[in-house]
Image: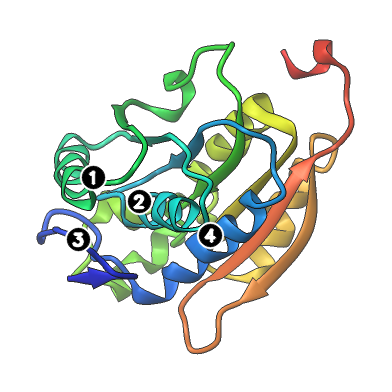
Amino acid sequence: MTFGGLTIRFDEYVLKPRSWTMAQAVWAADLADQAPAGRLLELCSGVGQIGLLLARLCAERGRPRDLLMVDADDHACELARQNADHADLQAPVEIRRSLLQSALSPSESFPIIVADPPWVPRNATSRYPEDPLWAIDGGDDGLIVARHCLTTIARHLMPDGFVVLQLGTEAQIDDLAGEYVDQLELVTRRRIAEANGALAVLRCRSRSADDRR
């Protein structure tokens, strides 16, 4: 399929890319224009379409950035590698298969992070029979994996960096942001018209280096 000008390969074993999520990449690229230098990071990257489009947009604006994409699923990472190779970006792309809790070293930090965790509450996953369960099941409240994302983000986001997070509803965004209010500030959130999802921008709250460890 075509996703923002990129040819993206996927199959029935991974989540099909949703065209509305191009808005996440565009928003992150706009924020990257004012963010510090450094690598882009995508968490729960799946087949990589959002992170790759973000990297493509940065390059088109004359500010190419390296990209790291993290996902726990082997097959999704294989497809992400193929999609990255086909995208022929100006900067390197690393695909890292790992659980979020162990994906990054303490020294790694990022100015722009996008995260696309599963956010469907477990008792509602049957509404999406065509989607792989592992790719949509967010636990009892839909926020289990999203919490792992924000815990990782709080440790690895640069002080002047930004996060663009994708969840299902604005209520989920507000609930999750409230849990991390001491570490991350919710800048704004946006429901995408005619889309099954919502986006939020977060940034670091001021804190000491000791607090970040």
* Residue closest to the eye, 65 or 13: 65
Give the labeled residue for mark 4.
166
Q: Residues within 10 Å of mark 4 (few under 14, many from 20)?
A: many
Q: Are marks 3 and 2 in contact (CB under 8 Å)?
A: yes
Give the labeled residue for mark 1.
84
Q: Position of residue 9 (x, y in %)?
A: 14, 58
Q: Is residue 149 left or right of residue 72?
A: right
Q: Earlier in the sequence, mark 2 or mark 4?
A: 2
What's under tag 3, amino acid-wise? Ile
Q: Residue at x 42, y 76 (%)?
A: 20
Give the labeled residue for mark 2.
52
Q: Residues within 10 Å of mark 3 (few under 14, many from 20)?
A: many
Picture quarter containing residue 3?
bottom left
Q: Can you say whether 106 is above or below 197 in the image? A: above
Q: Position of residue 208 (x, y in %)?
A: 88, 18
Quadrant containing the N terminus in the rendered view: bottom left
Picture quarter containing residue 193?
bottom right
Q: Residues within 10 Å of mark 1 (few under 14, many from 20)?
A: many
SS type, badge 1: helix
